[in-house]
Amino acid sequence: MAVNPVFNRIDKEASRGGYAGFGQQQPGGYAPPQGAPTIPAGYQPGPSETLTDQQLRDMYAQAPAGPAQTGRLTLDDVVVKSLMLFGVVLAVTAATWVYVGAQPAVGMPLWLLGMFGSLALSFAIGFSKKVNVPLILVHAVLQGLFLGAVSVTFNATYPGVVTTAVVATMATFAGMFIAWKSGFIRVTSRSRRIFSMMAMGYLVFLLVNIAASFMGFGDGWGIYGGPLGIVVSLFGVGLASYSLAVDFDSIDRAVSGGAPEKYSWLLAHGLVATLVWLYIEFLRLFSILSSD
């Protein structure tokens, strides 16, 4: 998936200063501490509402409310949801691999269903005003169909290419996280805009290439079958890799900004989609290299 409307949506909401009532600031620019009593501005207690010193001491002696009590997003929420969705993708991928391996004729229909179905749902999920968990789960299933069908097909033609792509994807994920966390790779508003434009252009290119490959151009590779195929593949790997840094930064901003816990599903969905995109780019690159 070359663009991720999920993170674009979250970033826009973060830039407005809050998430539907979460992360709102008090006068002076600071958000109220979690667990502190919230007193409306200008409120004066009446005679029957006056708090005794002991009551005040009891209130402040209580442990501050954590994210679970306030309904705010935590990093653990994102990690758990990501592992759940990733597990669904892997399970469906494995089942599809076995099924297509026994019946190669169904490989292309499942490939196309998973590819176009997951792409359409990505935009539907990203632009929806509500967090639709069932759609997110269906998207994970469709991605599993796509991955299973494309992986078993490529591996039959280029043995070992799937293992190489998986290792490269995991290594890139770890490397990009370390680079982003250490500050070596920075994500700014300007870099986000440039990345979004490049990613959208690359998505259009991919759709054109699919049409070209079906017409037999480039021996079934489309534009990738030409002399610039490797260069274009490297460009795709670079885009998908930087998308991981954008994802990490967006998750960090959402957690720091006090986004609602339900956003963990959106963030997990976006991160898993980027991992799938990166894997497909590596799979294509190593397949082209193997064919030369």
Image: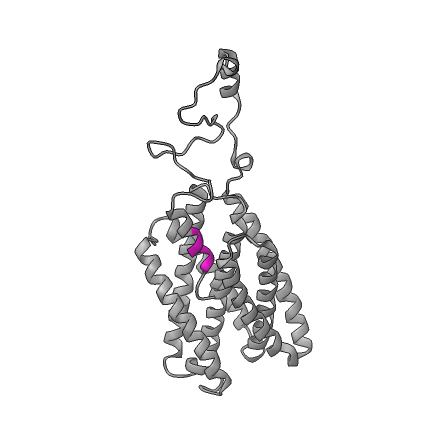
* Residue 142, percent from left and from top: 59, 66
- Type of secondary structure dominating the magenta stretch: helix
- Asked if residue 287 is positioned above or below residue 197 in the image, the reply reads below
Please tell me whether residue 248 belongs to the stretch shown in magenta.
Answer: no
Range covered by the magenta-colored residues: 5-10
* Residue 12, percent from left and from top: 40, 52
Seen at 64% across and 66% down, the residue is 94
Residue 213 appears in view = yes
- Asked if residue 3 is positioned above or below residue 209 in the image, the reply reads above
Quadrant in which residue 115 is drawn: bottom right
* Residue 186, percent from left and from top: 33, 53
Left or right side of 113 for 283: left
The C terminus - image quarter? bottom left
Choose between 4 and 45: the one closer to the eye. 45
Residue 291 appears in view = no
Seen at 41% across and 69% down, the residue is 236
- Asked if residue 106 is positioned above or below residue 235 in the image, the reply reads below
Choose between 101 and 145: the one closer to the eye. 145
Left or right side of 166 for 102: right
Seen at 32% across and 54% down, the residue is 189
* Residue 104, percent from left and from top: 65, 79
